[in-house]
Image (spheres, grey):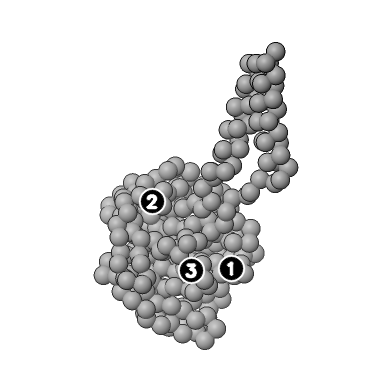
Amino acid sequence: MKYFVFLVTGLTLLASALRADPFAFYGISGASKGASILYQIDPNNGSILSTIGDTGLSHITAMSFNPLDGKLYAASSGSGASLYTLNTSTGAATLVGALGDSDDIPDMTFRSDGTLFAWSENNDTLKTINLATGAATDLAFGTDTYQTGLEFGPTGVLYLKVASDFYTVDVDSATVTYSMTTGVDFKNLLAIDSAGRVYSGVRDGSSTLLYTIDLNTTEATLIGTAAASFSAIAFTGTAPAIPEPSTYAVMFGAAALGIAVWRRRRNA
């Protein structure tokens, strides 16, 4: 019996590793200065897969994963605006530092080199944020914005969403170029997965209607409703840790040993 258990355990571990979902989708509540609770979302239908936990904060309005180390960063808005890291297992927040003023940060995003950019609706400008101190530095932009989303796509294009309208941002030349409109009055929610699928949403009381957006056709498609009022959404953007070859060897070995012992006992 113990060999059968060994076999099943090995096969289960192997199957689990091979079918792991490589990209996780997260949302956080906190609009209108409400409690900021971290959730994991199903990107196919918008439903909540799990309630991870309360951050202990309110009015978190932006979050993004650092592609270099996988850490989740979040920013609060208004008086005492600050940068935090969030524990994706518990939701617990750790203060990095103040953003430097009472700022409204509706969204932020990491570039592939680990530089964190945020948009300010106080002075309608792009900022870079120091990951060690939280200090924000203004860049030279001046586009009138509201309900703003900010996200780098997988090809390195920086998108700025203002309600229903989309723009591209050239950081080097400090220019914002109009791209398209969707006709849907989206809130400050914007996330793009590794395949280039664009997500946004509309808050509806205690729920959020989540959409995917085709940037080629401008079509917005409702995928479902999440039972939480999200103030920010983000994809991990990185695959989970792939088991080392030695780990696969252990799993295959467990399965092979179990099969060998089972056959020997069967033929005895």
Q: Is residue 215 visible?
A: yes
- What residue does disc 1 label? 112
> Would you call the spot at circle 1 few (<14 residues within 10 Å), some (14-19), or many (20 or more)?
some
C-alpha span from label 3 to label 2: 19 Å
- Marks 2 and 1: which is nearer the front? 2
Query: Residue drawn at (54%, 48%), measured in percent from left and top?
Result: 88
C-alpha span from label 3 to label 1: 10 Å
Q: Is residue 74 visible?
A: no
First reached walking from the N terminus: tag 3 or tag 1: 1
Furthest-front residue in view? 267
Q: Is residue 13 above or below residue 33?
A: above
Find residue 247 and report its horizontal and vertical position in percent: 70, 41
As helix, strand or loop, the secondary structure at mark 3 comes to loop
Apparent side of residue 91 relative to residue 208 in the rendered image (left or right):
right
Q: Quadrant of the C terminus?
A: top right
| Residue 159: mark | none
**Relative depth, front residue between 122 and 255:** 255
- What residue does disc 3 label? 153
Query: Residue drawn at (56%, 49%), measured in percent from left and top?
Result: 87
- What residue does disc 2 label? 44
The amino acid marked with disc number 3 is Gly
Query: Residue drawn at (61%, 67%), measured in percent from left and top?
Result: 114
Furthest-right residue in view? 246
Q: Is residue 179 above or below residue 79?
A: below
The amino acid marked with disc number 2 is Asn
Image quadrant assignment for residue 67: bottom right
Find residue 100 and report its horizontal and vertical position in percent: 54, 70
The amino acid marked with disc number 1 is Ser
Furthest-bottom residue in view? 173
Q: Quadrant of the N terminus?
A: top right
